[in-house]
Amino acid sequence: MNKYEKKKIVCPVEITLGVIGKKWTVLIIRDLLEGKKRFGELLRSLSGISPRTLSARLSELEKYGVIKKKVYPVIPLKVEYRLDQKGYALRHILEQMREWGTHHRI
């Protein structure tokens, strides 16, 4: 049971924002829509994010079932992140955000 089920949130928009509404989360998903990435690749592509914040956002996305983490038993440690089925389902939301941003530049 996640925190949204505990609070009995019934608004679908609020549920969606609870998963993707934190800073950096949508940009992480955007990058993973291109394919699997390692931690360092994500860190370099998200200019300004701290390693601690990236780690926290990846853990949250994994907890919500949006991404999958694969750890390879090699030295140095190799970890890859990829979108799960729930993550790919967010593609349409990001496409709409891109379209809106293109037409309504501030």
Image (tube, rainbow, N blue to C red):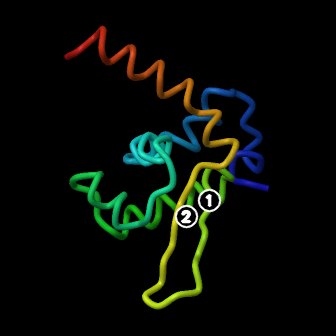
Q: Position of residue 38 (x, y in %)?
A: 43, 65
The amino acid on which the numbered mark 1 sits, given as a three-letter code, is: Glu
Could you tell me which residue is drawn at 28 percent across and 57 percent down? 49
User: Which residue is nearer to you in this view: 11 or 86?
Assistant: 86
Secondary element type, mark 2: helix
Q: Residue 48 in the image: x percent, y percent?
A: 22, 55
Q: At 23% across and 15% down in the image, what residue appears?
A: 105
Q: Image quadrant for the C terminus?
A: top left
Q: Which mark is residue 80?
A: none
Q: Check disc 2 and give the amino acid type.
A: Ser
60 to the left or right of 10: left
Relative to 91, residue 72 above or below: below
Q: Residues within 10 Å of mark 1 (few under 14, many from 20)?
A: some
Total of numbered circles in the picture? Answer: 2
Residue at 52% of width from left, 87% of height from top?
74
**Residue 88 falls in which quadrant of the image?**
top right
Tell me whether circle 2 and circle 1 mark residues in contact (CB < 8 Å).
yes
Describe residue 88's horizontal placement relative to residue 9 as left or right.
left
User: Quick one: label 2, few (<14), some, or many (20+) residues within 10 Å?
Assistant: some
Which of 24 and 40 lies nearest the eye of the viewer? 40
Q: Residue at position x 47%, y 18% from top?
A: 96
Where does label 2 land, which residue? 59
How many angstroms separate mark 2 from mark 1 (CA)?
5 Å
Helix, strand or loop at label 1? It is: helix
State the image coordinates of residue 29 (x, y, percent, origin top left): 48, 44
Across and down, in percent, residue 21 comes to 48, 40
Q: Which residue is mark 1?
A: 62
| Vertical arrangement, residue 90 with respect to residue 39, above or below | above
Vertical placement of residue 92 versus 60, above or below: above
Q: Residue furthest bottom?
A: 75
